[in-house]
Image (spheres, rainbow, N blue to C red):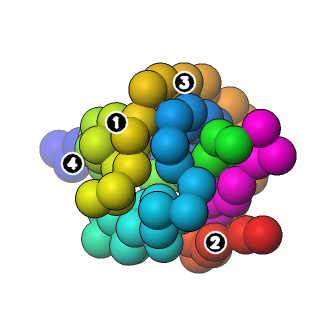
Amino acid sequence: MSEKIIFRSYKVTIKGKVQGVSYRFNAQAVAHKLNLTGYVKNLFNGAVFAHVEGKEEEINKFIDWCYLGSRLAKVTEVEAEETDLIGFQTFEVRK
């Protein structure tokens, strides 16, 4: 009997020193490695927002990475909330 693959969708907000430190591009690389879809973008308040979809185990790995971030990032808080699936085809960096 094969295991059913469950896809999830999460909105993730990352706070701290996360803009101007290549956070979004590193997040995109991690998402591609984990076969996740969605997008990442900077917010006006200095935070970074990601909407990720994929296998729950891979999303958990992505969220774990969000606490570390890029080499120069100083993450102070990560908020993750499950949301409805959109059906993204790729993972992109948005302006």
Q: Earlier in the sequence, mark 2 or mark 3?
A: 3
Quarter containing the C terminus: bottom right
Mark 4 vs mark 1, foreground winner is 1
**Which residue is most to the left?**
1
Residue that numbered label 2 is attached to: 93
Query: In terms of secondary structure, where does tag 3 sit?
Result: strand
Which x, y percent locates residue 80? 54, 27
User: Between 78 and 62, which is closer to the camera in this rendering?
Assistant: 78
> Which numbered disc, 2 or 4, marks the residue that appears first in the sequence?
4
Instruction: Check if mark 3's residue and mark 4's residue have beta carbons within 8 Å.
Output: no
Give the residues drawn in magenta, as a range. 38-45
Residue highlighted by disc 3: 79
Disc with the residue nearer the chain's start (1 vs 2)? 1
The CA span between labels 2 and 4 is 35 Å
Whole-number angstrom distance, CA of label 1 to CA of label 2: 18 Å
* Residue that carries the numbered disc 4 in the rendered image: 2
Crowd rating for badge 1 (residues with CA inside 10 Å; few <14, some 14–19, many 20+): some
Q: Amino acid at mark 4?
A: Ser
Which amino acid does the dot numbered 3 rest on? Answer: Glu
Q: Position of residue 14 (x, y in %)?
A: 54, 37
Can you tell which quarter of the image residue 6 is in? top left
| Mark 3 or 4: the one toward you | 3
Of callouts 4 and 1, the N-terminal one: 4
Location of the N terminus by quadrant is: top left
| Residue at left offset 50%, top offset 43% | 17
Give the mark nearer the N terminus: 3 vs 4. 4
Please give the residue where the numbered disc 1 appears in the rendered image.
67
**SS type, badge 1:** helix
Q: Secondary structure at mark 2?
A: strand
Which dot marks residue 78? none
Q: Earlier in the sequence, mark 1 or mark 3?
A: 1
Measured as percent of width and height from the top left, residue 76 is found at 44, 26
